[in-house]
Structures are given as structure tokens and as C-alpha cells.
Amino acid sequence: MDSVDLEGIKRDVSHKVIDIFESFEEENNCLPTLEEFRLLFNNEADQFIGPADTLNVKPGSVMHSRLQEREQKMWRAVNELEAEQRFLRSETY
């Protein structure tokens, strides 16, 4: 994976990751669990990778492979950003 791609994706999704943590903390006075965070981010994932059903992507096609690659890159970036936020916020809790 090209590190430039990953950095660009991280830039694009970083605000959403921070927003999820801030909103969750305000509502629950604690950090979200891994499962809670992933569920919350998954609700926003289509915004970053595009919904497969509206793109008419057929399994096995070149477009399907590209969509999967984009999704993998996005989740890798999100996982790294999530870890950063947990580390930064762990001092508070």
C-alpha cells in the first residue's frame, strides 16, 4: 500500500474519528469500546468508500476489487486513528 494513499485517507477520516470519540464521551462519559467505535464509524463508512449497491459493482469485477481495496485502506487508516485517540484520551480515564 502506498503510504501517500494512507496519509490522504487518514486526513479525510480523521475529523470523523475525533467526532465519534467526542460525541460518545459527551453522551456516555467514557471511551467507546472497539465494537462500539467500529459500529459508529461503519455507519459513516459509505461516505468515504461509496455504497456498493449504488455503484452497481458486481463481485469479481475490476470495480469490485477497487472498492474492496479502498475499503481496506480506509479501515487501516481508521484503525490507526482510533488507536491514536485511545492513547491520547486514556490519560483522562
Image: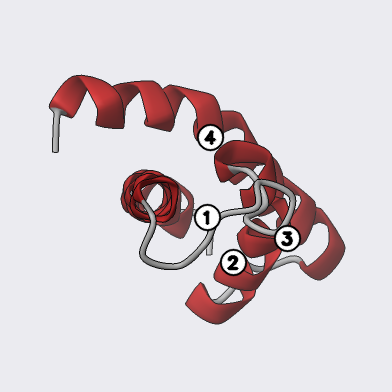
Question: Looking at the rendering, which quadrant does residue 1 occupy?
Answer: top left
Circle nearer the N terminus (2, 1)? 2
Q: What residue type is disc 2 on? A: Phe
Neighbourhood count class around disc 2 (C-alpha, 10 Å): few under 14, some 14–19, many 20 upward: some
Look at the picture and state if 27 lies above or below 33: above
Q: Decide which of 63, 20 is in the foreground and name it.
A: 63
Which residue is identified by label 2? 37
Which residue is identified by label 1? 92
In this view, the mark in front (2 or 4): 4
In this view, the mark in front (4 or 1): 4
Q: What residue type is disc 4 on? A: Val
- For the residues labelled 3 and 1, the Cα–Cα distance comes to 27 Å
Residue 84 in view: no
Neighbourhood count class around disc 1 (C-alpha, 10 Å): few under 14, some 14–19, many 20 upward: few
Neighbourhood count class around disc 4 (C-alpha, 10 Å): few under 14, some 14–19, many 20 upward: many
- Secondary element under disc 3, as helix, strand or loop, is helix
